[in-house]
Image (cartoon, grey):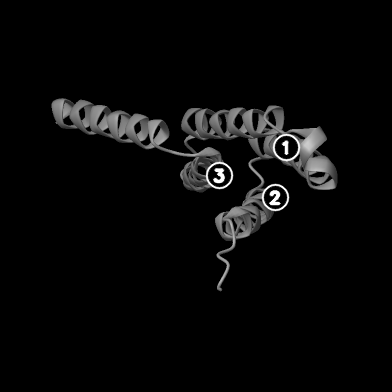
Amino acid sequence: MMLNRKANASYGEVMVESGVMGADRTQLVQMLLDGLIESMTVAEGHINRKAIAEKSFHLTRASRIVLGLQSALDFEKGGDIAKNLNELYGYVTKRLLHVNIKNDIEALREIRHLITEIREAWTLVPSLTRPKLRVM
């Protein structure tokens, strides 16, 4: 049983590393947002089961992802969007701390919903940045 868990974990790490190495910036942000949403979802399950250590682990992981996203913002090129995302990420970080302290599932669902909306918006980025084909 333990061997299977280790094998699955190793496989998962290889798949993530492979995905990261072949990803462009947009895909990397999407992957981070997916990981953030996953961490919050898993944390909710641990709150429901009163598994405090596991909940804290996943909320801490979520916080690290948010801080990574926040530190990658380019305020020169990103303008108002970068400023708004910076404020959103700051808010999410504060709420994650609140969730970790209070086990507040409603607050967790609120921020997961916000991040899910941001993730959905990122699916549009490739079509917005792709060069337009000119028809002659």
Q: Secondary structure at mark 1?
A: helix
Label 2 CA crowd tier, 10 Å (few <14, some 14–19, many 20+)? some
Q: Which residue is mark 1?
A: 98
Q: Residue 56 in the image: state x and y as whole percent.
A: 55, 30
Q: Quadrant of the N terminus?
A: top left
Disc nearer the start of the sequence (3/2)? 3
Q: Is residue 6 above or below residue 130?
A: above
Q: Mark 1 against mark 3, which lies toward the viewer?
A: 3
Q: Secondary structure at mark 2?
A: helix
- Between residues 114 and 126, which one lies in front from this camera angle? 126
Q: Which residue is mark 3?
A: 26
Label 1 close to label 2 by CB (< 8 Å): yes
The residue under the point 80% across, 34% down is 75
Q: Is residue 63 left or right of residue 27?
A: right
Badge 2 amino acid: Ala
**Residue farthest to the bottom?**
136
Q: Residue 112 in the image: state x and y as whole percent.
A: 62, 51
Q: Point out which mark residue 1 bears.
A: none
Q: Secondary structure at mark 3?
A: helix
Disc nearer the start of the sequence (1/2)? 1
Badge 3 amino acid: Thr
Q: Which residue is mark 2?
A: 107
Q: Is residue 50 left or right of residue 104?
A: left
- Between residues 133 and 24, which one lies in front from this camera angle? 133
Q: Residue 12 in the image: state x and y as whole percent.
A: 29, 34
